[in-house]
Image (tube, helix red, strand yellow):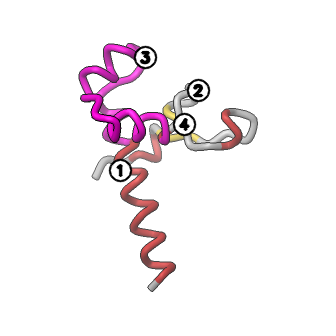
């Protein structure tokens, strides 16, 4: 699992405090939604040239970590 903490940022005044990629206005949720809708990593990178493949992996790692923490809370 990549160390997403170097890539995923949370700023109270940006996108309502949602986790974003490297301080950009692109949220983790945006990336996950694109992937869930069937977009490939290559398509996302083409549409958003400011992103890297590492950014996409960081979003997935962040989501997996949050899910893991949520499961621990519910046990």
Query: Closer to the camera, 30 or 24?
Result: 30
Alpha carbon separation for disc pair 1 and 2: 19 Å
Label 4: which secondary element: strand
**Magenta region, residue range:** 29-58
Residue 59 vertical placement versus 52 (above, below): below
Q: Residues within 10 Å of mark 3 (few under 14, many from 20)?
A: few
Left or right: residue 8 compared with residue 57: right
Answer whether labels 4 and 2 touch (C-beta < 8 Å): yes
**Numbered tag placed on residue 50 in the rendering:** 3
Label 2: which secondary element: loop
- Which residue is label 2 attached to? 25
Along the polypeptide, which appears first: circle 1 or circle 2? 2
Q: Residues within 10 Å of mark 1 (few under 14, many from 20)?
A: some
- Is 11 within the magenta? no
Q: Where residue 36 sits: x, y (%)?
A: 34, 41
Query: Closer to the camera, 25 or 3?
Result: 25
Q: Quadrant of residue 43?
A: top left
- Which residue is label 1 attached to? 61
**Numbered tag placed on residue 20 in the rendering:** 4
**Numbered tag placed on residue 16 in the rendering:** none
Q: Quadrant of residue 50?
A: top left
Q: Quadrant of residue 47?
A: top left
Along the polypeptide, which appears first: circle 3 or circle 1? 3
Answer whether labels 2 and 3 touch (C-beta < 8 Å): no
Residue in the image at 42% along x and 38% along y: 33
Along the polypeptide, which appears first: circle 4 or circle 2? 4
- Is 49 within the magenta? yes
Q: Residues within 10 Å of mark 4 (few under 14, many from 20)?
A: many
| Residue farthest along the bottom direction in this orientation | 75
């Amino acid at each position: 699992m990549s160390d997403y903490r170097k890539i995923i940022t949370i700023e109270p005044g940006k996108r309502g405090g949602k986790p974003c990629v490297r301080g950009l206005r692109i949220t983790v949720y945006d990336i996950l939604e694109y992937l869930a809708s069937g977009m490939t990593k290559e398509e996302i990178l083409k549409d958003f040239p400011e992103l890297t493949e590492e950014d996409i992996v960081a979003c997935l790692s962040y989501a997996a970590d949050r899910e893991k923490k949520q499961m621990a809370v519910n046990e």
